[in-house]
Amino acid sequence: MHFSVLFFASVASMTTFALDNGLMRTPPMGWLAWERYRCDIDCKNDPKNCISEYLFIDMADRLFEDGWKELGYVYVNIDDCWASMERDKNGRLQPDPNRFPGGIHRLARYLHDRGLKLGIYGDMGTHTCGGYPGTTLDKIEIDAQTFADWEVDMFKFDGCYSNALEQELGYPQMSKALNATGRPIAYSCSWPAYQGGLPPKVNYTQLGQICNLWRNYGDIQDSWSSVLSIADWFFNNQDILAPAAGPGRWNDPDMLVIGDFGLSMDQSRSQMALWAIMAAPLFMSNDLRTISSGARSILQNKMIISINQDPLGIQGRRILKEKNGIEVFWRPLLNNASALVFFSRRTDMPYRYQTSLKKLNFTTGSYKFTDVYTGQTDVLKDSTEFVVSVNPTGVVMWYVSAPGKLQYHPYFKGNKLHRPAYVAEENAFPRVFL
Ligand code: GLA
């Protein structure tokens, strides 16, 4: 399809539906405990890595002090295994008293004082996936109110230990209940992941109306095979998934595992590039206290973040799958700019891939491109043949500005990333349930 047609089709679909709570007009960014810290509750022997308030305070300090917050990484999200095994005498969820002695409200205050936001986890069902108390249909209102009382900013609603009917009732009911608290709480739904991620079982129109983001697929693990299988599933199903995404409503391919143990530097660059093309939420699950400078520079790459955070919020697509193992991805951006990713599935040696912008469907004209990882920049005519050298399991990623304009994305002027005002002030939007 011609790019301008694709562009207008996407913009048209964008206006049709969205959870109108004013939140997450661009994909959320932050840190999430699960992949790296799982259900480690052994604070006696592993105090620095167990699920406790100290872990979240440590990560909040790092986000605040090490330049993450300014780039948009503002959420600090608790996942499973935070709760006490018993509800309190009023039927409310409560945190494990030994691991969260200050309580969740105080943790939220600590984060808010630093301009950060707190996310928490619950489960539509009798138990969480880790066996902690779940939220059955009769508990939805009280749990939503508890999170609002604690001044929580985001809620992930998992789906273990419930059936399809309970989920069909529970996920919309929780959306209404969160809305009814009057507190803006972004809502992450795992519902589609429990129903295979595809229509007819999954209704993406409805999800866009009730959730800000949703997990479509299985859990990420700290390995390249896991990252690749997730990326493949999302791009194989892009015709269904891409139209579902837009400001306020995002597909979630799961956490970034950059900075952990399983990915090489090239594979880390690939995850970051593909997640940016997908307009994916950027939740890191790693140890910000000890992260390497290489991983940090990938995660803090301003040009990629600005591509991920593009205000149009159009999810990009795979546009070519070559027999030689090279795949090309493209995402349209504000001001007729776009992002291109050349990805290699090969496992032999850097591959010299020859093409032209014309072959990639760009219209006639001159384009300025910047390699987002090397900073190399040049001007290309659509018809000019060029070669990119793509490492095994690696990427080359370009920011391409519109023909004739040759201007950079409005997000970065000089060295500073300029986020649109509504990103900083999203809580000022009234929360209106459709
Ligand atoms: C499920 C979810 C994960 C994580 C765990 C917690 O597997 O998909 O993201 O929340 O439960 O037990």
Image (tube, helix red, strand yellow):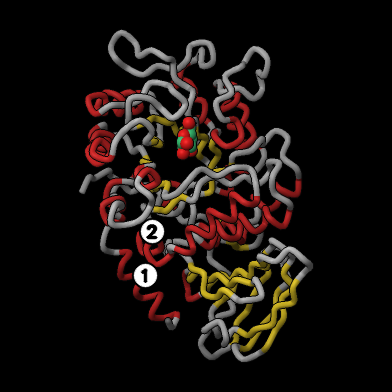
The residue to which callout 2 is attached is 245
Q: Secondary structure at mark 2?
A: loop
Q: As displayed, is residue 376 above or below residue 70? A: below
Dividing the picture into quadrants, the one containing residue 93 is: top left
Q: As displayed, is residue 394 above or below residue 361? A: above
The residue to which callout 1 is attached is 10
Q: Is mark 1 within 8 Å of ligand 1?
A: no
- The amino acid sitting under disc 2 is Ala
Q: As displayed, is residue 81 above or below residue 418? A: above
Residue 64's x, y, as percent? Answer: 60, 36
Q: Let me know if residue 266 appears in the view.
A: yes
> Which residue lies at the image location 42% right of the left edge and 31% below the top edge?
121
> Which residue lies at the image location 25% right of the left edge and 35% below the top edge?
166
> Which residue lies at the image location 52% right of the left edge and 58% below the top edge?
308
- The amino acid sitting under disc 1 is Ser
> Which residue lies at the image location 53% right of the left edge and 63% below the top edge?
277
